[in-house]
Image (tube, rainbow, N blue to C red):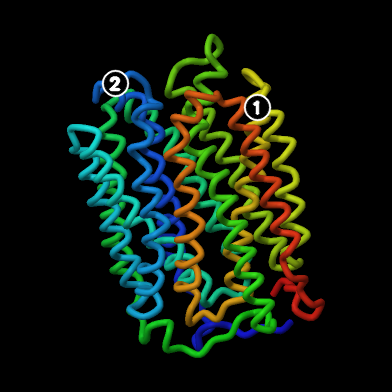
Amino acid sequence: MNATHSAPDTRDHSLAVRLLLNVGHGLDHMFLLIFAASVGVIAIDFGFDSWEDLMPYGVGAFLLFGLGSIPAGRLGDLWGRRRMMVVFFVGIGVSTLLAALTQNAWQLAAALTLVGAFASIYHPVGIPFLVQKSLNPGYAIGINGLAGNLGVAIAAVLSGFLIKWLGWRAAFAIPALLSIGFGIWFAYVCPAETEAPAKRKAKATVNFPPAIIARALAVMTVSAATGSVLFNFTTNGNGQLLLERFKGIVEDPATLGIMLAAIYTVASLMQVIVGKLLDRFAVRPLFLGIVLMQIPLFLLASYAQGWWLFAALLGVMVMIFGALPFVDVMVVRYVDDRMRSRVAGIRLAISLGLSSLAVWALGPSVKSLGFEVMLMVMAGFAVCTALVVTLLPKEPAASTPTSN
């Protein structure tokens, strides 16, 4: 196996640090989706006629989630990943508390944009920090992806119950206080870094010529952008899709939240399976197979109603979540650890910045075209992803990962 590990100290992070890094991924996604889970109630409170009209006010969070990745990644490599993770936990908690205190749509939009700015820290900093000493990075990324998407599931169910029992403001405030507490715990249990990642000696796992690496980076950026559109559209729109397609069958918001959380929880397990496979096999055939499966499932979901929709949506989310580890594994495999946060930051800024349009367009598009047409459009995005993945360079046999 043609590989060297990132740090001179080959011991992995302590269990507490790994746990908190994974919890951080869950919080990152959860905070970004609290608004989507509560948009219907907030719209009524702020005097909007429908949730579709309020939804575009959340676009700033996803725009900053992408664009903020560039400075976050740079600071992670040059200033230190531990410090940036403390900033992440505390900053996203404080900004979410501000969201809970807002009195109108524009105040909420500003607070959500601040949430997105702090949320942008996690992916270019937290994931490279997690895997920089890992002997099985694919599996570590798979577990981390499971944690992240459990955050998506928790956002659906926790927000539903908090809204029902305490109101939408509690759905923001209670997780915010937890995040601040986790930040204090992380600062206590995570040792200070002896030097910033940019000053260390490290190599990528697979040694390709620069032109091939540039092609791989282009493929991972474009595929991440199309994949992020699918992720943002579904995770922000699934709650309203279930509400529409289960009318007359299930209408209680808390019950629908549990159903959606069940979908996300089951789908999240796919990331662990994919992560384990990526420690043993090449990226391209696995990635292509999962993306191709998304196409018929989106088409089925576009027409399905009731429990058939539940089954189709479960299949869609299994394949969307299953595709998520690939780009992070490609960064680990092709990019030197000294610059992984910066490369990840640039890639995320492009892909998430573009995919934030999915959040902005979700409400108006569904209002004008309906979920049926928009799910067909998402199938088209899956086709685009598949075409791009075919351009990924083939890994030499000697560099195909094996388990340690």
Q: Mark 1 points at which residue?
A: 302
Across and down, in percent, residue 109 comes to 28, 41
The residue located at (57%, 26%) in the rendering is 371
Q: Which of 248 and 279 is in front in this view?
A: 248
Quadrant containing the C terminus in the rendered view? bottom right
Q: Is mark 1 on a helix, strand or loop?
A: helix
Give the residue displayed 61% in from the left and 67% down from the top. Answer: 218
- Residue pictured at 58% horizontal, 31% vertical: 374
Quarter of image, res 106: top left
Quadrant of residue 308 in the image?
Answer: top right
Query: Which residue does the image show at 36% across and 30% down from the upper left?
Result: 38
State the image coordinates of residue 300 (x, y, percent, origin top left): 71, 29
Which mark is on residue 44? 2
Helix, strand or loop at mark 2: helix
User: Which amino acid does the dot numbered 1 rest on?
Assistant: Ser
Q: Which of 212 and 330 is in front in this view?
A: 212
* Location of residue 242 in the rendering, given as x and y in whole percent from the top left corner: 53, 24
Of the residues shown, which amino acid type is indicated by label 2? Answer: Ile
In the image, residue 348 sits, relative to residue 240, either above or below, namely below
Quarter of the image where the N terminus is located:
bottom right
Residue that protrudes farthest toward the top in the picture: 248
The correct choice, above or below, for 76 with respect to 143 in the image is below
